[in-house]
Structures are given as structure tokens and as C-alpha cells.
Amino acid sequence: MSDVSPLTAALLRLSQAPGVGTVLLRQALEQARRGTLPSDPLDLLPADVAEKAATSEEWVASGDFLVGQLEAARRFQTRIIGPLDPEYPPALRSNPDVPPVLYIRGMLMPFIQRSVAVIGTRHPTRHGASTAWRLGRYFAEHACSVVSGLAVGCDTFAHGGALEAEGHTVAVLAHGLQTIAPRENAGVAEAIVDGGGALVTEFPFGTKPAGFRYVQRDRTQAALSNGVVLVQSKQNGGSLHASRAALRYGRWLAVAGATEQDIADGAPVIEANQILTHGSDTEKSLLLRVSAEQLKHVHVLSGKSDYENLLPLLWRQDRANDTELFNDADDLARRALHRREP
């Protein structure tokens, strides 16, 4: 069976206890961070919740759940990690919405904090599709991990561009790793893993896709990345979940401008782009649900030349994290192999 740390095993079991959701799991994690891991995982929960859970059928079955997850991890060549494990991405570990458990198939980058999420509609225009591809390729060529969600449309093109550049790309999924959704992107998923990238999810084996899980997936994409690039989106598009989360997490958001042809065609998938590139500050704030002050972190991409304007942000963040996160000389040497100074 795949090995997991004692804390990760405890969190997996606690996730099955009645009344325990993500909020209580994060609280249990914080308690474990402040002290030693108790012999009984229920001691990490509030007393009233632990008392009710102790005699429940769900808790009794949680041991079998853990064994089943470990067996599935071995079968699907997946690692299960928690926030205190060395491989856990630093950007996620310090996030307020930290996923208590991550399932990873493939390899994360040794400097995963230099990463860009490229997202957008499932039905891009021809220009949107080519833009997502170019962005994926561009950032991969500049030693960035390209993060997206493996959906059809912009996600697929972003992953494709990164793969064409033989770069690193991560697909964040809204379901367990026992399957790939949509099924038509199973080949893309395999290409990501074969190319040295990773499939990542916070959902256990057996979890099926559902609408609310895509919202969580979108937030994780933003948390995993230095910034988010919105290629195309309707005014009520799902890609706005990650866009809003990026600003809430203190990341930057870049928005691709629409072409004259797409504007003339009245393409619905550029509605959000038009507001964020040409609207008033009030309109932008309402769409992104942020303050006017936070809009200073929104950047407009009018063309490929503007991609370069995002690189200094990535390099500055990368260097700022060197001392704190990568003070081991061997880690720094490995990372130096991938550096391409702008």
C-alpha cells in the first residue's frame, strides 16, 4: 500500500466522521501543527463533535476507508499528502482555504510557486483557443508550471501549449483520480503525466464530478498559482471563480483583450473580458466582487508582447521565496537548472 504520514492518515479518517467537513478538518490540522499528534485522531476535533462521532458507524468504517484509499493510491500510482508533508506545495500550505489532503499522480515542479493558471470558457472563439495555446506554450517556455483544469476548451488548449513546449503543466481535477472527466481528455491527462507534469485533486478516490466541486477546484487552481490568466469568459462564467479567488488570495489576475472580430460577432464568451478591460472600476469590482483597491492587481493583455509584463512579477515572487522556502543548497541547484532569466 502507498505510505502516508500519520497526520494525513488521521485527516483521511476524520473526513469520514459525521459532522466533519473541510472547516473542521482545517481546524484539526491547525491543532496538530501547534502540538503533537494524539493517538486518537478524534482528539483533534471539538469535544462535542468527537463524542458524537466516536460511536458512529461512519467512524467505525473510517479505518476501512483509509485502507481502501491507500490501496487505490497504489493501483493508480498516486501519492496522498497533507500540508505538513515536504511535497505539499508551499503556496497551498499558506492559503486560508488549504486543502487538508491532496492526491497527486505525476510530479509537481520543484519550484511550484512559479506557476500560472490559464483558464477560460469551454467554448472559446477561434482567437480564444489560439490565445490559450500560446499562453500555455509561452509560460512553459519560461520555466513556469502551467496550471489548468483539464476541461474542454481553454483548459485543453493551455495544457496543449505547455506540452508542445515540453514544459510542465498541472491539471487540477474536481473528482477522484479513479477517473478522468471529461472522458475525451483522458489522452491529455496521460500526456501530462508522461510529460513530467501532474494530476492533482483534493477529492478521495470514488468521488464523482459535481458542480460545487468545480468551484472548489477553481479556488485550488488560483491558490496553487502566482497568478491567473483569464482567456475568455461569459459574465456568469465558471472561470470567474478562480479569477475572484486569485485576487482574494493576493495573487494577480491578467485578462486577455477581445479581438475586433469577436466584438463584431457579439461573442458571449467575451462578456467578462469586455467589462474587465473596458468597463468602469465599479463594473469591474461588481463582477469580481472585490474592492477598487484590489483592481490594481488586474492586468490587461492586449497582445503577446504584454505576456512579458507578467514575467517580472513571477521572478520577483520567486526570488522573495528563495530564502524562506528553498534554503537547502541542493534544492536551489536543482531549481537553477530550470531558470531562464527574463
Image (spheres, grey):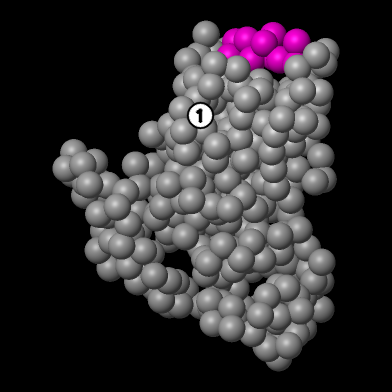
Give the farthest residue toward the bottom. 280
On screen, residue 88 versus residue 199, left or right, reads left
Label 1 crowd bin: few (<14), some (14–19), many (20+), radius 10 Å: many
Q: Residue at x 52, y 66 (%)?
A: 251
Magenta stretch: includes residue 64: yes
Q: How far from the left and from the top, in percent, is residue 191?
A: 52, 34
Specify the quadrant of the image occupied by residue 282: bottom right
Give the farthest residue toward the front. 47
Figure check: 254 above or below 58: below
Figure check: 303 above or below 181: below
Q: Quadrant of the C terminus?
A: bottom left
| Amino acid identity at mark 1 | Ile
Q: How far from the left and from the top, in percent, is residue 215?
A: 74, 51
Q: Residue at x 52, y 43 (%)?
A: 170
Magenta stretch: includes residue 120: no
Q: Residue at x 21, y 42 (%)?
A: 328
State whether residue 323 appears in this view.
yes
- Judging by the rendered image, the residue that carries numbered circle 1 is 81
Figure check: 148 above or below 261: above
Q: Residue at x 27, y 47 (%)?
A: 326
On screen, residue 137 versus residue 272, left or right, reads left
Q: How far from the left and from the top, in percent, is residue 311?
A: 37, 68
Where disc 1 sits, the SS reads strand
Q: How far from the left and from the top, in percent, is residue 104?
A: 53, 31
On screen, residue 139 versus residue 103, left or right, reads left
Start and end of the magenta stretch?
Answer: 59-71
Specify the quadrant of the image occupied by residue 168: top left
116 or 64, which is in the foreground?
64
The majority secondary structure of the magenta stretch comes to helix
